[in-house]
Amino acid sequence: MNHDADDDTDEALMLAYAAGDASAFARLYDRHERPVYRFFLRQGVAAHQADDLLQETWMAILQGAHRYTVSARFTTLLYLVARRKLIDQWRAGRQHVLLDDAANDPDGESDADGTTRMDRVADGDAAQPDVQAMSRQHADGFVTAVQALPPAQREAFLLHVDGELTMQQMADVTGVGIETLKSRLRYAMRRVRCACADWLDARVPGAAREVVGANDGV
């Protein structure tokens, strides 16, 4: 079945679901389920916890559908809810995670420079097109490098890459200023680049290398 492009946006699908079209929500879920699940996994939660958080996030979206208005992109709302669910779980488990630069950035100083838009990063199973040249070991190493980032930097990295959020959307989701987010993302990219340096240049051509090294020398 063909859909008009304007009717296939996330926002249009959410409005259609709110008006009673259950199939619209199914399409929305299929589109975003995997990136949101990766967002949880790469924050260091176990797979079963990621499953629970995913369901809680979408349940909250469903429950609030009747109040939905297009005041921002749907993904801003989606990742705002996902982030709140993750923080709620951390609090319930008495896991104290600080999402601020003083606690998470040993480099210290803030960097106000801009960042280059990243396209995609590798799934743990190396399923995305621009990382098919990687071995499974290298793909797993990439994910490990992301998970090893300080929490504030990891969050910025995942929201921008997996969530494909703009800087403004990231600011709306986290309540953090754009310049601070740019700094976090820049430091995150440098750390991932450093962690992958042993094999990246020699083994990964083209787009996959650009994803990791996009901010070198900026």
Image: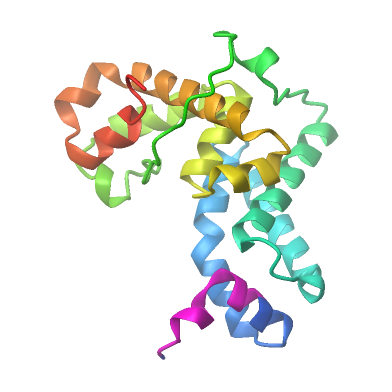
Considering only vertical position in the picture, is 21 above or below 145? below
Residue that appears at 54% across and 8% down: 107
Locate residue 117, reporting x and y percent. Answer: 40, 41
Residue that appears at 22% across and 22% down: 199
Quadrant placement of the N terminus: bottom left
Rendering colour mode: rainbow
Q: Please give the range of residues in magenta.
A: 2-14
Tally of marks: 0
* Magenta span includes 10: yes
Quadrant placement of the C terminus: top left
Residue that appears at 65% across and 87% down: 21
The quadrant in which residue 77 appears is bottom right
Judge left or right: residue 212 versus residue 59.
left
Judge left or right: residue 85 versus residue 211.
right
Considering only vertical position in the picture, is 31 above or below 196? below
- In the picture as drawn, the residue positioned furthest to the bottom comes out as 1
The quadrant in which residue 5 appears is bottom left
* Magenta span includes 150: no
Does the rendering let one see residue 47?
no
Considering only vertical position in the picture, is 54 above or below 170? below
Locate residue 135, reporting x and y percent. Answer: 23, 35
Judge left or right: residue 106 versus residue 199.
right
Locate residue 51, reporting x and y percent. Answer: 63, 52
Magenta-highlighted stretch: main secondary structure?
helix
The residue nearer to you, when weighing 66 against 38, is 66
